[in-house]
């Protein structure tokens, strides 16, 4: 099992429903986020292109946040999901510094570090991550890359795609479908 998220940038309308769903599902404190939407403008008038996309922890195969954690609070579970055990986290912030995607934040009350879990608690019940479930344009896909017949595998076989900051060498598991 190797979980991956695939997001079609050609279908994202930037509505931020994925962000609101995540905040509600995971009790994310006000002013913080586990996922966010970015806008990138490319080209020059009149040939300008706008790319909208939903970003989060990439659940990297080669995760610096796990390697640098002094207590083992940051760890990888089945399917390649990177999690933080709240009560083992001493709030040192090393993982926040090490993440090239700025995917982690320190919980303002608990002091521990928090981030996207791919909604691990929902996966255990056979449900999709909350963001995937609510996206009104259905541009987010979630599944197992080890299964060659899964929707995510098919999309990556047939569509042009990219990952963010490949130069960081983290082997991310969130993919973006592009033109
Ligand atoms: Fe894009 Fe879907 Fe998120 Fe809306 S909910 S911003 S369409 S990924
Ligand atoms: Fe760690 Fe950042 Fe990769 Fe998530 S995106 S696994 S927090 S390095
Ligand atoms: Fe590990 Fe917590 Fe330190 Fe991050 S802040 S490196 S999870 S102990």
Image (spheres, grey):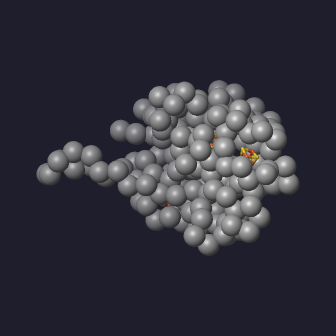
The vertical placement of 177 against 114, above or below, is: above
Tell me where residue 66 sits by quadrant.
top right
Tell me where residue 130 sits by quadrant.
bottom right
The vertical placement of 143 against 36, above or below, is: above
Where residue 128 appears, x then y in whole percent?
70, 52
Where residue 151 appears, x then y in whole percent?
60, 38
Where residue 77 appears, x then y in whole percent?
80, 38
Quarter placement of the C terminus? top left
Q: Write the residue at 64% across / 62% down.
A: 22
Decide which of 27, 90 is in the foreground and name it: 90
Decide which of 28, 100 is in the foreground and name it: 100
Decide which of 175, 149 is in the foreground and name it: 175
Could one spot residue 173 in this view of the protein?
no
Among all residues in the image, which is located at the extreme front?
A: 92
Where residue 135 appears, x then y in whole percent?
55, 60
Among all residues in the image, which is located at the extreme bottom?
A: 30
Among all residues in the image, which is located at the extreme left?
A: 46
Q: Write the residue at 60% across / 65% down.
A: 32
Q: Write the residue at 59% across / 44% down.
A: 97
The vertical placement of 170 against 52, above or below, is: above
Q: Write the residue at 54% across / 27% down.
A: 169
Tell me where residue 144 sits by quadrant.
top right
Q: How many marks?
A: 0
Quarter placement of the N terminus? top right
The vertical placement of 31 against 135, above or below, is: below
**Seen in the image, is 140 located left or right of residue 61?**
left
Could one spot residue 14 in this view of the protein?
yes
């Amino acid at each position: 099992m190797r979980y991956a998220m695939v997001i079609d940038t050609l279908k994202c309308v930037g509505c931020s429903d994925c962000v609101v769903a995540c905040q509600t599902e995971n009790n994310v404190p006000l002013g913080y986020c586990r996922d966010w939407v970015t806008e990138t403008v490319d080209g020059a008038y009149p040939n300008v292109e706008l790319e909208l996309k939903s970003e989060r922890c990439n659940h990297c195969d080669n995760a610096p946040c796990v390697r640098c954690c002094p207590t083992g609070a940051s760890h990888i579970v089945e399917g390649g999901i990177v999690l933080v055990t709240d009560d083992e986290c001493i709030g040192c912030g090393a993982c926040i510094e090490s993440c090239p995607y700025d995917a982690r934040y320190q919980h303002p009350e608990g002091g521990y570090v928090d981030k996207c879990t791919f909604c691990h608690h929902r996966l255990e019940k056979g449900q999709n991550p909350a963001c995937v479930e609510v996206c009104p344009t259905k541009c987010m896909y979630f599944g197992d890359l080890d299964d060659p017949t899964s929707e995510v595998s098919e999309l990556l076989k047939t569509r042009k795609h990219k990952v963010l900051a490949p130069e960081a060498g983290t082997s991310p598991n969130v993919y973006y479908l592009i033109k």
